[in-house]
Image (cartoon, rainbow, N blue to C red):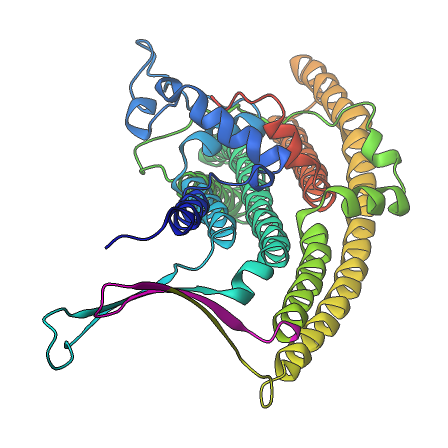
Amino acid sequence: MMINSQSRGYALLLILFLAGCSSLEPPSDAALMPPLAAIVAGINADPEFIVSSEQATEPASNDGANVGLEWPDPRQAQRWAIANAPRVSHMIAELQSSQAEIWNASMLENPGFELSFLEPEAGSGRWQLEAGLELGLADWLTRSVRLDRARAVHLVNQLDVLDDLTEYLHQIRQAWLNAVASRQQMAVHDGLYQTAFAMLEFAQQVQAAGNLNELDFLVYETEHARQQRALQAARLEADIAISELQSLLGLMPDELPVLPDSLPKVPESDKQSLMDVGQAMNLAEQFQPRMRLLDEALNQQLAAERLIKRQVGLLDGAVKVGVERETNSERRLALGGSIELPLFDRGHAHLADIKAQRSSLQAQIEQARTETRHTISQALMSKRSATELARQVDAEDLPRHQRMLELALQEYNFMLRDTFSLLTLREQVFDAQLEYVAHTLAYWKAESLLLKLTGIDTDDVAETGDFQ
């Protein structure tokens, strides 16, 4: 079938345009937000240096230290999780799906192509050929609005993933703190048990010599049993805390991380403790994914509303281009179109749904701000109280108990104090150590909560781009 040169030119331009639309690369504005981009870039930069869970359990030396699982602070555990945990891999896959959605929104609908043959008329041996191409009109004219909505959806999806990542990093930090604190507390309970055991052994000797009645002996025996149960409970708590950390990171039970023996001391100076609620709220509104997610979800609803109004106002239709060959070998071009009149569906139901969702989001935003403000206030109060109590025990109570034990030991050497009172003073030292661990743990947990609420933790973990 031959058509004139002008028709061939139009057809060629149309084919080139459609081919270009079908091969568009992902839009540049589909790029990820800085924290997510840094994480994805860090993971993809050099996969050879990502420590797998199998490699992480191989001993680095004869002492059995695990490669990649030595975490002296929670941030290193978080970075390891970003590079290795299955949960983060799932989040990255969701980001890739979101990028594919915005790419898909930039595409035009596939054109409809029609081809038909008609039986020749009487006395003619030539079949009549008809060919046509149909392109949606509204799809072309709403592309820019659809892209705006797709970008808004893409940003909301990123913030949703970032919110999940922030919560996940918070859980890792909390699990790390619990694991280290429980091991530290178990060591103190072991000291208490050893003290109670020594007191019971001495009581048995004194009773055998006839210098201790049965009632006093039963007191020491009861204390020994109590400290034994406390030590068993502390061991169980430590094992459970380690197991929870392994579960969060996707580790097997035999993949034991190398953790410090004690929590970091409460720092002498802390900028976060000096913040007021208003300053913390300003940070939360800038960096907290949940707050930003709700704000951007509202923008997404506005973009969806603009798209519906544009679609209804365009009177959805199509443009048709056709070529027909007559039985006498003449060829004709045909142009046509169709429109869809909005007589019944004028988009009112969709607009009403979006407006209702917008009202719901506005209420959620106000509720989230109120809850965040109260939670920040409580975290700041808890942190300041824990700071004061931990410093008091560390600077006053523990030195006092240590000094009392030293003086009691001197009197014991001069036979001025009995063994029971000496061991009792030693128990008080361990009790003070347990109290210090509890206040220190409360301090770091309050700081972890503030890092989550202000959204700072994720940026700090991602800023170096080194997740090994």
Is residue 248 among the parts visible in the rendering? no
**Vertical side of 146 occupied by 64: above or below:** above
Residue at (49%, 45%) from the top-left corner? Answer: 99
Residue at (56%, 22%) from the top-left corner? Answer: 465
Residue at (76%, 19%) from the top-left corner? Answer: 403
Q: Tell me which segment is drawn in magenta.
A: 313-332
Picture quadrant of residue 342: bottom right
Outermost residue toward the top in this view: 61
**Vertical side of 198 occupied by 137: above or below:** below
Horizontal and vertical percent position of residue 281: 83, 47
**Vertical side of 298 occupied by 215: above or below:** above
Is residue 420 among the parts visible in the rendering? yes
Residue in front for this viewpoint, 310 or 271: 310
Q: In the drawing, does residue 116 fall left or right of residue 380? A: left
Residue in front for this viewpoint, 112 or 345: 112
Q: In the drawing, does residue 382 fall left or right of residue 2? A: right
Residue 319 forms part of the magenta stretch: yes
Horizontal and vertical percent position of residue 302: 71, 64
Horizontal and vertical percent position of residue 391: 80, 29
**Vertical side of 203 occupied by 381: above or below:** below
Residue in front for this viewpoint, 196 or 319: 319
Horizontal and vertical percent position of residue 300: 66, 60
Residue 271 forms part of the magenta stretch: no
Q: In the drawing, does residue 144 fall left or right of residue 338? A: right
